[in-house]
Image: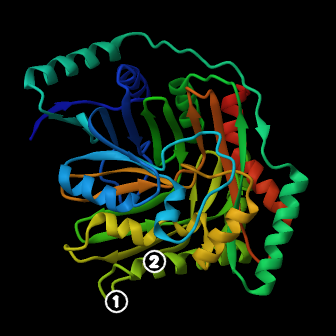
Amino acid sequence: MRTVKKYPFSLTEASKNRLLQWAQQFQEFVWLDSNNYSQTHETYQAILAVDAFTALKTDSQDAFNKLKEYQSTTADWIFGYLSYDLKNDVENLHSKNIDGLDFPDLYFFQPKKLFLFSENNVEMHYLNIASDEMEEDFNTISEIIQQPEESEISKPIKISVRTSKDSYLQKVEEVLEHIKRGDIYEVNICQEFYSEDSEINPLETFLQLNKISIPPFSVFLKLNEIFALSASPERYLKRTGTAVVSQPIKGTAKRLKNKVEDLKMAQQLANDPKERSENIMITDLVRNDLSRIAEKGSVSVEELCTIYTFEQVHQMISTVTCSVAQTISSVEILRNTFPMGSMTGAPKISAMQIIEETEDAKRGLYSGAIGYFSPSGDFDFNVVIRSILYNSLKKYVSFSVGSAITINSIPEKEYEECLLKAKAMREVLNNTL
């Protein structure tokens, strides 16, 4: 049983930063932040979960069954991630590419201390902890917030490219041949940027990345030596009771400093036949995935190819919803829709096979999902894109980017899109802000 107390609390940039500094004392914690981005499916402004009471860590073999047992047995809040390579548990697939990060394929924990933030309040949910400790923690946090901010910026690190430009262009040409033969209609091809024997300050790196991106699905995840610093603009899947929503992104355009030109750029994206085609194909794939678990006739497209503007880019997003029976387990919903269509392609299995043959690095947590389950089985997960991943024991830093290849793709432009998506992570790691 959790003890619950509510306190008045205002989330400002300064209070967030100091709160995360307080959380650094724990070996396991996750921070999920909407950054006050206007979205119709928001439940909390932010969530902080710290200090594992129990945990599940496993490779891909039988991973979803293990997660289902863990989630149903705890019947509590659990937080963690699903790596892209859980595809190997869902389908007869494998992952043999280079893996510099060496993260487990799945990792969840049940936090002792949980903070749910709304506009003017925080609800503290503590597990097997006396209420006076809640009071002490809140008083300590309140005091810390009043103190002057301290920051320690990481030294710039040298970033290497796993796939050269010439190699990437060649790979896109090969993928286009698959499309011409009818093997696939669309596939998301990604490339890794990495740094070996490098150390970063995870919190300060995250704060800088979040500051210049201000995304709606921001995450700071620390699981012992594992860190994910995510400025994701994309929701993978959310369940609230019998309602399920997915919001795939396909279609990207750069921001411009001139407001008039920037608006034109957004309008060009909205009317671009290639970008709309990419988005519609993936929206259809998501509809098909959801139909496996949805009540008959309940799958609908709430938004199609709507333009959302973020600090770094304009994005084309569709929103797909459905109803599910109360008896369908949350893990089954995830199993039947994972990995997300926006990061694979169509048809999904063929696309994943071509991804494995084409890419040079194992995706791991990149293009997987980070999120949580509530005690009732509700859940919310982002898509791990625009994210820096870090193994502090191996001193390995990684981020990956990709673009969707369709019959109308021009290899050079797809490469430029990758560099656009990499811009924020490169700037933060090289301290060239």
Front residue (pair 132, 306):
132
Residue 40 visible in the current orientation: no
Q: Which residue is mark 2?
A: 289
Q: Residue at x 61, y 67 (%)?
A: 344
Q: Amino acid at mark 1?
A: Gly
- The crowding category of the residue bearing disc 2, from other C-alpha atoms within 10 Å (few below 14, some 14 to 19, many at least 20), is many
Q: Earlier in the sequence, mark 2 or mark 1?
A: 2
Query: The N terminus appears in which quarter of the rendering?
Result: top left
Secondary structure state at the residue bearing disc 1: loop
Q: Which residue is mark 1?
A: 297
Q: Amino acid at mark 2?
A: Asp
Front residue (pair 231, 122):
231
Secondary structure state at the residue bearing disc 2: helix
Query: The C terminus appears in which quarter of the rendering?
Result: top right
The image shows residue 231 at horizontal and vertical percentages of 54, 43
Mark 1 and mark 2 in contact (Cβ < 8 Å)?
Answer: no
Residue 325 visible in the current orientation: yes
